[in-house]
Amino acid sequence: MILKNYRTLIVLTFAQCFGQTAAPILVLLGGIVGAQIAPSIDWATLPIAIQIVGIASATIPASYLMSKVGRKAGFLTGSALGVIAALMAALAVNRESFVLFCIASFMMGNYIAFLQQFRFAVAESVPIEQVAKCLSVLMLAGIVAAMLGPEVARRLSVIAELPNYVGSFLGMAALLTMSFLILLVFYRNAATKLEDHDSAVRPMGQVFRQPGLILAIVSAATAYSVMSLVMTATPLSMHEMDRHSLDETTWVIQSHILAMYVPSFFSGYLISWFGVIRIIQAGFVFMVVSVLIGWGQPEFIHYWGSLVFLGIGWNFLFLGGTTLLTQSYRSSERFKVQAVNDFLVFGLQAVGSLSAGVLLARIGWNGVMAFALPLLLLSVPVIYFVSRSMDSPASSLATDQ
């Protein structure tokens, strides 16, 4: 019975354990490889930024494709694209082609846009009161990905007769192939019930004027833009500028990604107990603390502490925002709203990532920290006024909407 009721959640969680390794591997190695093969150090983090541009550019096509051919066909298409991108990245490093590496990074972003649809497939497969808890379970796959991806990349970074890091991307291709096979064999499209009163599609202007939906988008956009800005800059700042070892840099990135997903053991329950608004507010506070810890002349412990608090803040903001999002649209509206949300969120994430390399090269680490503060402060009035406009009983989880 459990397998039947939660089959989609179980299958997608296992598939995400392998599929989600693409992001931490590129975060760890994108700036390092970029610094070695880019024409200028200013362009070192461009591959990571281009990956996020790839996510933003594929959000609407991914959602549209799945609305036409179903989730399974869409997930398999995206996974195949990810495998090809990983192999292309290995070839780019082997040939020291920065342009080809950027193209591969863009395609990895396209793949991750499909991967982001996992959370919506899970939300559609369970009762509304179970959405927050099931999404937190799905996010636990990030723990496995955080440990597995960078570890595979590190262990395969040096292979005899191959340039450094070629093996890392071949390892990524193998991991994404595992995700593809899990989806191919075990995933089934789940029929989504359209209730009579949900059959009509409302004007999009009416949908996006909902306070809950506004707060959902702002929370997720803040989470991703600030997280991407700081996380993109960290490996290059640590390894290339401050001369920390690859092992130390790997540990900081792994710790950060663990901090992004370990709170999922309890954050779904926290939403049920304290309400989604309180969790979003707590996520904002964790993000501010992250910037304060990282400010100055950071040593290893400062990088580590800043990235850990950054990860926890991301978890609370993103899970809270996604929970509100999935309860702000009708079933017949879901693909359009999901596409617009992800386009806005990952478009702003791309801004954060694109800014990281330039800020780091021109101003240094504190320039990155200084740029993060306005991104955070811009969300304050939205969180405050939208929170006040939402009725307290409904805002606690919106399960009675």
Image: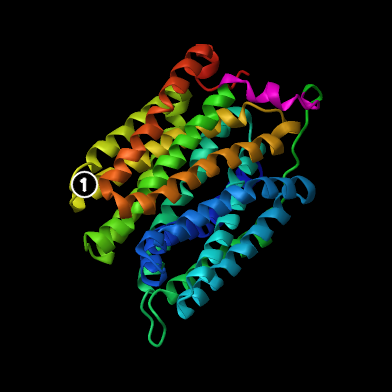
Query: Which quadrant is the N terminus positioned in?
Result: top right
The residue furthest bottom is 161
Q: Residue at x 64, y 65 (%)?
A: 80
- The spot of residue 352 in percent (x, y) is 44, 45
Question: Is residue 87 shown above or below 120?
Answer: below
Is residue 61 visible to the viewer in this orientation of the structure? yes
- The spot of residue 77 in percent (x, y) is 68, 60
- The spot of residue 7 in percent (x, y) is 63, 47
Question: Is residue 210 shown above or below 221?
Answer: above
* Amino acid under disc 1: His
Please tell me which residue lies in front, 255 or 28. Answer: 28
Chain part drawn in magenta: 198-211
Is residue 188 rendered to the left or right of residue 365? right
Residue at the spot of label 1: 302
Q: Residue at x 70, y 39 (%)?
A: 335
Labels in figure, total: 1
Residue 288, located in which quarter of the rendered image? top left
Q: Is residue 206 magenta?
A: yes
Query: Which quadrant is the C terminus positioned in?
Result: top right
Please tell me which residue lies in front, 347 or 1. Answer: 347
Per the image, label 1 sits on a secondary structure element best described as helix
Q: Residue at x 80, y 25 (%)?
A: 200
Q: Is residue 65 magenta?
A: no
Is residue 11 rendered to the left or right of residue 199? left
Please tell me which residue lies in front, 292 or 318. Answer: 292
The way the protein has been coloured in the rendering is rainbow
Is residue 152 rendered to the left or right of residue 80? left
